[in-house]
Amino acid sequence: MRKLFAILTMLAALMLASVTAFAAPSLVDNAKVLTPQQRQEVLAELHKQEQAHNVRIAVVTMKTIGGAVPGEYANKLLDDVYNDGQKGNMVLLQVTNTRKWYIATDKQLKQVIVGNEGIEYMSKPMVAEFKKNDYAQGYITYAQKAGELLEYYEKEGEPWDPNAGFNWFALVIAAGIGGAVAYGCRALLISGMSNVQEAVEANAYLDKQTFALTHSNDTYLYTNISAVPKSKSSGGSSDDGSVSESSSDDDHGGGGGSY
């Protein structure tokens, strides 16, 4: 398995080397999912974000990677091919025969795009496009979202965190105060209405002088039962862009899933 992985990685590296002594292109469509026009559009967005943030943002599509693990394969691409970004490197690997995706970051960008939340900020809108078979827009979305995360870090000096600044204690206190105020207002309104008094039983609200029940009868009509089959679990994997697998280590960040 390791020998196969090494061979596949070497072949991918050879295909990526479009200019012998220079950097590999940021888009390598080995799976042939893009038209020439789409390739130009995706490359334009990748280059735009790379130049704006001095990083390498790459996309590699493969029909198959054999028995290799997508995360390990993507990490190897960072180590051997995409490692020339001044402020970091990242690569999106898409494997079409297994419908797998993986976004890997190097050690530098691991500190900028943190945890599953950072990866999913890019992957969820990207996978939404994949599921519409609009791969070009998916890659463009990935690049744009990566740029947003990088811009946030440059402005704020810290990684984007969806939970930053959210105070659960303050929420509980606010909810408690709101509930107390509502209860107090209700009690005040009720006490101000002299003709209102709660009844213990429902029939107390009935004016017995205006109602007389002559007879009663129960008639059974029918029972309608509908059975809805329970959806089967797919083994815990998700195809909405959520991270379901990771090969992150001390030198790599990232995560991946299915689409």
Image: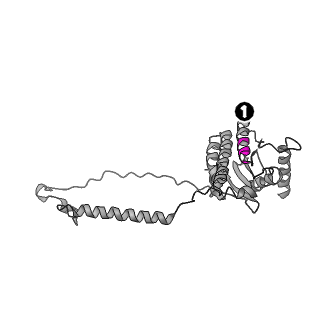
**How many numbered discs?**
1
Which secondary structure class fits the magenta region best? Answer: helix
Furthest residue to the left? Answer: 209
Where is residue 167 drawn, in percent x and y? 52, 63
Region in magenta: 47-53
Queried whether the magenta region covers residue 49, the answer comes back as yes
Where is residue 256 drawn, in percent x and y? 68, 54
Where is residue 52 drawn, in percent x and y? 71, 45
| 254 relative to 21, above or below | below
Furthest residue to the top? Answer: 37
Position of residue 213 in the picture relative to residue 135 (left or right): left
Position of residue 173 in the picture relative to residue 231 (left or right): left
| 46 relative to 172, above or below | above
Which residue is denoted by mark 1 in the rendering?
37
**Residue drawn at (10%, 57%), measured in percent from left and top?**
209
Queried whether the magenta region covers residue 70, the answer comes back as no
Image quarter where the N terminus lies is bottom right
Q: In the rendered image, which quarter is residue 254 located in? A: bottom right
Nearer to us in this view, 231 or 31? 31
**Residue drawn at (73%, 60%), measured in percent from left and top?**
248
Secondary structure under the numbered disc 1 in the rendered image? helix
Near mark 1 (Cα within 10 A), the count class, few <14, some 14-19 or many ≥20, is: few
